[in-house]
Amino acid sequence: MTLTTEQTTREQWNTFRSALNEDDGIGVLKAFRDRLICDGSFNRAFNIDPEMTLKSEYSILSISDICIFIPQQLQEKLGWDGEKSDRAELLKKTLDLDRLQRERIKQLQLVHAGWDVWRQKQITRYQNEDRSPRGVQITHIPFAIELTQGCSGACSFCGLSAPQLSDKGSDARDLGAAFERLLKELHKHSGALGEYGVLYWASDPLDHRQYETYAELFAKEFGVWPGTTTALAETQLERVIQIIHSDAMERPWGLRCSMRSASAYRQLCQGLTVNERALLRLLPQYRQSGSVQALAGRAYQPEAIDRQLEAGGSIACMSGLLISLPQNEISLITPCRAEPLNRNGYRTLASTQAATSDELADAAKRILINLPCPVISPGQLLRVNIDRSQYSLYCSQEFPDLLSRLEEQPMSLVELCRQLSPASSPQELIGYCVTLLQVGAVRSV
């Protein structure tokens, strides 16, 4: 996507927001579409008698409003002639902004040349490894900053296995200057892509009482609020309403709400107006909604590993820096299909600890300076960082047993070169090891 297309995206979003105030049917149509995917009992009733259900529950809507949002067999049952209303066209284009933004994120380049080369390798690699619809949605954002340690949500579907909340985070007033320095450092290296960084990972933004303050500092640096995804919306309705009426909504679909249950969806409906809900992207995560979970984190099932190619093997949408403010730690991570050694659907390639929050910006530079390949000296030991089931993804005809040998015993490049057969090339071996380091298949000890 070009910058012009990005501007068009924002214009489309603003057109939708304005239309909500001019036509009551826009918000009602969005509510109908959300209810179809979030309310199993309504979905079943609509499938049995769509015409009567529409008339009794959503009389303001016509067949031409709803039909592009329902399955083909129901379109035929309603005798749809293919006509789409202006409402339907507007909502469809606005919903499509989510997909367009994902495409834009993957196409944007990082300012830091080494980081960009490394990220592009991860994008290509993961596209080949996970061709599921969910795999296509992995955008490889540049960084994620955890404001808290753990999450209070305890979601059974958590694809990152977030631990129980144990640290509610630092006071923004105390951390403000260090946080701003960190953001400036990240912005310098990430450029325009930096605005797609987020302030959560295996955490929930609304667990931090001052999330909005951190988001405003983010906006001060990057020009827009960070995209926000929460599983706690129905428990903190007042904050959600405040965010809806803040600058957060300048970003298309800037607030995404994971619904943990049908009850959570109903609470959200009761606490927000139709037009407020229309600005939210609702993500039902419970079985009754028919949602498909990526087989990662708490949803990882070794016995169902073959289904990853259908359901997806990761929700880890980042090839970049995972930053923990509570722990003052930064890691370089990249997505992978979840497996026994990396059940949360990502691999850690390198980590560094900052003594204090004031040193986080320098810690980020220490990791980035070594890209596109994590640094390795000839004498450092290499160990396998993936499960045996993943070996076939990175097999080399020249060195077919290297990963198995490193699994048995970590070895250095010097030791590996000593064991080479006369027909093998040390340069090719080193090149192969560099590739394995870049994708996180091996890691230095």
Image: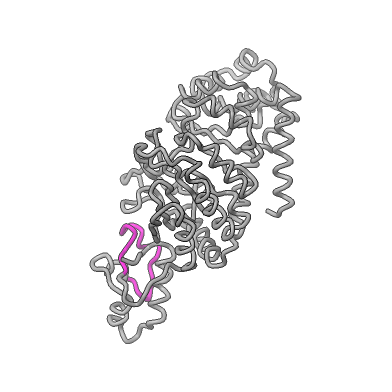
Residue 136 seen from this side: no
99 sits left or right of 305 in the view: right
Q: Residue at x 70, y 30 (%)?
A: 88
Measured along the vertical axis of the image, is residue 342 above or below residue 258? below
- Image coordinates of residue 60 in percent, x first then y, are 70, 17
Can residue 330 be seen from the camera position used here?
A: yes
Relative to 1, is 366 above or below? below
- Picture coordinates of residue 402, whole percent (x, y): 31, 71
The residue drawn where x is 37% and y is 37% is 165
* Magenta run includes residue 334: no
Taking depth in this image into account, of 83 and 336 the one nearest to the observer is: 336
**Magenta range:** 382-401
Q: Is residue 116 left or right of residue 25?
A: left
Q: Nearer the viewer, residue 411 or 313?
A: 411
**Quadrant (top left, top right, bottom left, bottom right) of the C terminus:** bottom left
Residue 87 appears left or right of 213? right
Circle count: 0
